Each structure stands twice: as structure tokens, then as C-alpha cells.
Image (tube, rainbow, N blue to C red):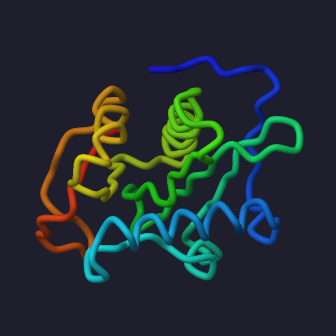
Amino acid sequence: MSTSRPSDWQIKTGLLDNPQVLALLEAHLKGMQAASPPESTHALDVSGLKEATVTFWSLWSDQNLLGCGALKQHSEGMAEIKSMKTHDAHLRKGVAEAMLVHILQFAKQQGIKALYLETGSMASFRAAHRLYQKHGFEICDPFADYVLDPNSLFFRRML
């Protein structure tokens, strides 16, 4: 499944020292901490996003940061989507979908067979649930080191 995005949007790898990226990631962490109790908050901080097993992308229009996303490799053939965040000024413009499509394409190129993610189970995450389901993700049991948690919902897509 693919989606078109405006031709001036650019996805860039890295940039974890960029002030706009750092501010967006800080907002992401604060939002996750506000929405979930500490034991149910699984967002990576910048040091976690810099790990060798993680690839981080940001989506830009000119000099404006629109959003970000990451892929964490757990094992050969298995990875997890992390740090999906759209800048508040760019909600409902297709930013998250463009990032998700990019991550799906990258994962396929890397030979990933099973792609997972964890997100909140609360009503504030419903738009994310719909987006993942639109792109073939199905609710699944906890994976990797996750455990059953009423505040978490787990998804998987076989590639």
C-alpha cells in the first residue's frame, strides 16, 4: 500500500542533534508520560534512538520539521516501529502515514519479515490505531520484552 506525499517533503536519516528534532522528541516523551503511567511508557529517549539497532528519520518541508519515526531491529527478520510523532502544527496532513509508508518500505528492503509496534490503548491513540490497521497491522500479543498491560496495545504486520 502506498500513499503520495507533497513533492517538497523530504525524509532524512539521523539529525538527532538538530534543535527542532530534539524539541519534537521532548514533546513526544512528555506526551507519552502524560498519557501513560511510568511502567507503561515505552518511548525511547535520544540516547535510545542513537543505539546501533535503531534507524531514526525525520520528515521535513523546507526547514520545517513535520514529524519523525524510527525502526528498532530486535533480531534478524524482526523489528519494531518506535517514536512515531507528528508535530502539532502538522496534524492531519498525512505526515504519520508518509513516515509509516517509508518505514514499511525500508523494513522490506532490510529483509524484515515481522514488523511490530506498541502504542497506547487509550482513546487518545485511536487515530494511530486506525492508521496502523489501514496499513495491514493487526492486534497481537506482547512481543520482545513487553508484557500484558491494560495501557498498551500491540500490533504486528508480516511483510
Q: Position of residue 109 (x, y in %)?
A: 56, 41
Residue 3: x percent and y percent?
A: 54, 19
Give above or below for 75 relative to 39: above
Q: Residue at x 32, y 53 (%)?
A: 116
**Which residue is at 55% across, 78% downward?**
48
Residue at x 63%, y 76% (from the top left corner):
46
Q: Quadrant of residue 119?
A: bottom left
Q: Compare residues 42 and 145 and report the one nearer the observer.
A: 42
Rendered position, 2 above or below 102: above
Q: Nearer the viewer, residue 159 or 116?
A: 116
| Residue lying farthest to the right in this orientation | 63
Q: What is the x, y in percent for residue 8? A: 82, 26
Instruction: Give the image location of residue 34, x and y in percent.
Output: 38, 70
23 relative position to 17: left or right: left
* Apparent side of residue 49 relative to residue 17 in the rendered image (left or right): left
| Quadrant in the picture for the N terminus | top left
Q: In the rendered image of this protein, does residue 117 appear above or below residue 148?
A: above
The C terminus lies in quadrant: top left
Snapshot quadrant of residue 158 = top left
Q: Nearer the viewer, residue 88 or 29?
A: 88
How many numbered discs, if any?
A: 0
Q: Is residue 116 above or below residue 151?
A: above
- For image coordinates 55% across by 71% down, the residue present is 53
